[in-house]
Amino acid sequence: MRFRFLIPGLATFGVAAFLLHTASADEIADKFQQFDTNHDGVLSGDELNASPILRQLDLNGDGQVTLDEAREGMAKMRNGVVAKLQEKLGGGGADGKLAVEFVFKRLDKNGDGQLTPDELTDKTWFEKLDVNKDGAVTLAEAEQVLGKTIARRALERGLPQTASFTEADMASFQEQPLLVKAGDRGVGRRVDNLTVKGLDGHDVAITAAKGDKALVLALFSATCPISNKLGPELARLEKDYAGKNIAFYLVNIAPETKPDELHKFITAFGLKSPVVTDSAQAAQRALAATTSTEVFVLDAARTLVYRGAINDQYGLGYSKDAPTKNYLRDALDSVLQDKAPAIAATSAPGCALDVPNAARPAATNLTYNHDISRILQANCVSCHHQDSIAPFSLETYADVKEHAAMMKKQVNRGAMPPWFAVETAGHAHQWMNDRSLSETDKTDLLAWLNSERPQGNPADAPVPRHFTSGWMIGQPDAVFQIPRPVQVKAEGVMPYQTEVVETNFTEDRWVRGYEILPTDRAVVHHVIVRVHAKGAKLKEAGDASEGFFAAYVPGNSFRVLPDGFAKLLPAGSRISFQIHYTPNGHATQDQIKIGLLFAAQPPQYEVHVSSLAKPGLNIPPGDANHVETAEMVIPTNMMFMSFMPHMHVRGKAFKYELTTPDGKSEALLDIPHYDFNWQIQYQYAQPKFIPAGSKVRITAIYDNSPGNPANPDPTKTVRWGQQTYEEMMIGYVEHFTPRSTTKVAQQ
């Protein structure tokens, strides 16, 4: 695990302090080269006398120190220092801080109550702490500069040091409609004609008029309290979407309701849409309805594009003064813009329904137009369309027939769609961006691919998806593009490219969303965007192991945070792009850019990305299952939003685990088959509460054997480095904290 100390003198010697402070593999190499005066790649003879620490790094006792020995020795020393500090402090105390007095006494070797340059050997810190410039540092001077305590950076890693949440705060996140896996709820499937009863008892076919872009089926029960609470919003929806080619049907799910109760419900809210009764539960069975408040949105081709709650204002046991999320309105606005809703399925708090499942059609009746095209639209076409990142399009029947064999292979082996997290027991659909195929979709797709692949009736085809070459988030408030195009060669591999852009903002800004847009998507593998404070050098800011501001992977190029959440972009900061290009046989160039959306007002919560990293990697040659671990204790109550593991081409598996103070353990994220080609951010559907004192542990497995076809050289010992022939072990964690009262510009 990588540690940073605020006071380099903690280690009691200058060189060790420097290395403990910086700790990155590249910076250790730089320091090593400074001592290697004859540039022969080893430290020996008089070179070892340059600092007392250097002879301690001669691990094999042969009278010389190699760079690998320096790295390994520093890792051991660093761990020893931290272990002693934790032993002395009993874990560092509840607030995760070190007392300045404790540190002072460790450095004051002769116990005379002051630190001399021989005891505090870091010149920069000595000058800072020697306030009266008398050549010695007293405890009073140290506390004057640092305060009574200093954050123990061994645990900090960007994490909050004061309590931000209580467990009770989690209730506000749990008592909302929950995001659910759309494919498991039939989203993306065609809903055939439905017949229900009108209030006069006659059959009514639920259809949309010619030219309508969407059809809304809103379930209700006149006797359900939550249905009644949502009545005013139903009336507003009718009014607000009148004349926009949206058809509404109000579906009474309780046929035993008395006519006067039904009439009272309709007239009390002034509802104008057709009211029908699902007396035989035909519609409820076909839609697999779950509650009395659920709404369903079908597009012009009767594809189910959204199902779930109207909004988040009411639920079982709670009410809000106003909704913070308007799921149905957002879905309808997306359909009107020919876009897929960003949130396609939620639970719908309401009175539970007891509905038997509808019989599924036999697999032999599946056709491309009626079934398979919709599965592909929902799961594949966002990447597999013309001029996109995927190697071929799957937009047409001809496309699918041409690539059927490859589709079968990739779906069977679980490589497509790209999603590598395994579902943990008791946590169904815990990820908001879960891209895996539902079991139903996977079964039907493979059954059709293994059949004669019938095309079916063209009239059953879905509405074609339209993809923009511009911004998916809409017009950004600010755009920053790298200053020059990067030339991407036709063949081979390319080292990471780093480009930097100045923001030139004179005030801090709150960023509620971003999109990273390459000019040639076909060659961009992934991008990590970081923000550097004004005046900071890139080398001082680390090597991306400490967090990131934004990230790009194929099929996941943008992020819009929930209402009330934002990231801070400090005034005068710079933006760096770390870009991994993959040559594809055609020489090209790319000039990537990022678009930012600013919050209209300061957010309630500030979003951060922290990390747990282990730069002291030592992966032996030929090892097919080399295990590395790192862990940290969480200093305060936290809310986790997402994870993003990062390794290179030898990465094989990755796991995040949690042990809470009461001793209970659980897997937070388990990726048994890590794929470097997909740097996925796994976003919680609901934030995860982590109590203070919990231990987070990451485990990575590496394959450095000849059996790994991506292995650049299985005969080499592999250590930390930024290039793909080196390795990394980073467990990114996105979390949020209540915002401080700092003044920040909005627009």
Image (spheres, grey):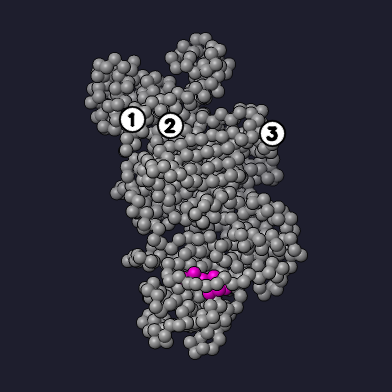
User: From the viewer's perspective, is 80 left or right of 406?
Assistant: left
Above or below for 81 versus 295:
above
The amino acid pointed to by label 1 is Leu
Q: Which residues are magenta?
A: 284-291
Q: Which mark is residue 3?
A: 2
Q: Which mark is residue 89?
A: 1
- SS assignment at label 2: loop
Alpha carbon separation for disc pair 2 and 3: 33 Å
Residue named by callout 3: 706
User: From the viewer's perspective, is 19 left or right of 322?
Assistant: right
Quarter of the picture containing the C terminus is: bottom left
Asked if residue 286 is among those painted magenta in the image, a careful observer would answer yes
The amino acid pointed to by label 2 is Phe
Q: Quadrant of residue 190?
A: bottom right
Q: Residue furthest front?
A: 663
- SS assignment at label 3: loop
Inspect this view and state whether residue 622 appears. yes
First reached walking from the N terminus: tag 2 or tag 3: 2
> At 31% across and 48% down in the image, what residue appears?
740
The amino acid pointed to by label 3 is Pro
